[in-house]
Image (cartoon, grey):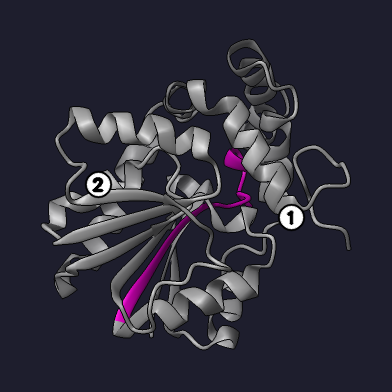
Amino acid sequence: MNPVTPYNNTESKKEQVAQMFDNIAFRYDFLNSLLSLGIHKGWRKKCIKLIAHKKPSAILDVATGTGDFAIAAMKLNPTKVIGIDISEGMMKFGREKLKKMNLDKTITLQYGDAETCDLPDNSMDAITVGFGVRNFENLEKGLANMLRILKPGGQLCVLEFSSPRKFPVKQFYMFHFKYITPTLGRMFSKDTRAYTYLPESIKAFPDNERFTAILEKVGYQKATFSSVGLGLAAIYMAEK
């Protein structure tokens, strides 16, 4: 089965995803809030609460984008937060946000991805991924490398879109992603594929029990998930 990619050209999925996010970076935060009605901020806060009890000092945020998850993690008073992403365009806007918030000394955004990140073994107390795992080129390879980086007992927290199963959320979701999301995406981002790729990638992603099974296969312990937003997304927790 061929992977779902933004532009369906001969470039690798990683290259296409980077190009897509570079293209929409200037409107990403605005469109994210518009399309989700700001609900995604509450989901991130819930993620942060779930990892708070272990008081993580060193946190890695994978697929950090403009740094929203990394910024949310500052509520935990970490000594350092590293955000990695394959889109320099997204991180450019993220670094501007960090400077305005005086967080650029604690949070560092740098080029990288889950599969090839060369941070030392057992070096991070927690790893977060917000709406990024479905964009991995090799899902299991990315998850395995993050497991290597986690300290023993460290936590992985993944926030990702799901495909709702129940009426009427499923019907609303299908209408929203088929008509509203692509239309608004074209109007504001000027990238005709980015916001049609979104529902395609969600549909192709192995969500809920399928994803926790993959986490366990790779070697994570205590893999669980909880639905949020009436099944629009899920929070996955696992430990090393």
Q: Give me the residue at 60% from left, 18% from top.
A: 189
Q: Is residue 43 above or below residue 152?
A: above
Marks counted in the figure total 2
- 123 lies left or right of 200: left
Which three-letter amino acid code belongs to the residue tagged 1? Ala
Residue denoted by label 1: 204
Position of the C terminus by quadrant? bottom left
Q: Residue at x 25, y 44 (%)?
A: 71
Front tag of 1 and 2: 2
Q: Is residue 118 left or right of residue 74?
A: right
What residue is rendered at 32% in x and 57% in y?
82
- Given the image, on which type of amino acid does mark 2 rest? Ala
Drawn side of residue 41 relative to residue 228, left or right: left
Q: Which residue is mark 2?
A: 72
Q: Secondary structure at mark 1?
A: helix
Question: Looking at the picture, how far across and down is residue 146, in whole percent?
Answer: 47, 74
> What's drawn in magenta, residue-wise?
154-170
Location of residue 57 in the rendering, given as x and y in whole percent from the top left corner: 17, 68
Measured as percent of width and height from the top left, residue 43 is found at: 35, 47
Local secondary structure at mark 2: helix
Image coords of residue 129 (percent x, y): 44, 57
| In the rendered image, the vertical position of residue 197 relative to residue 208, given as above or below | above
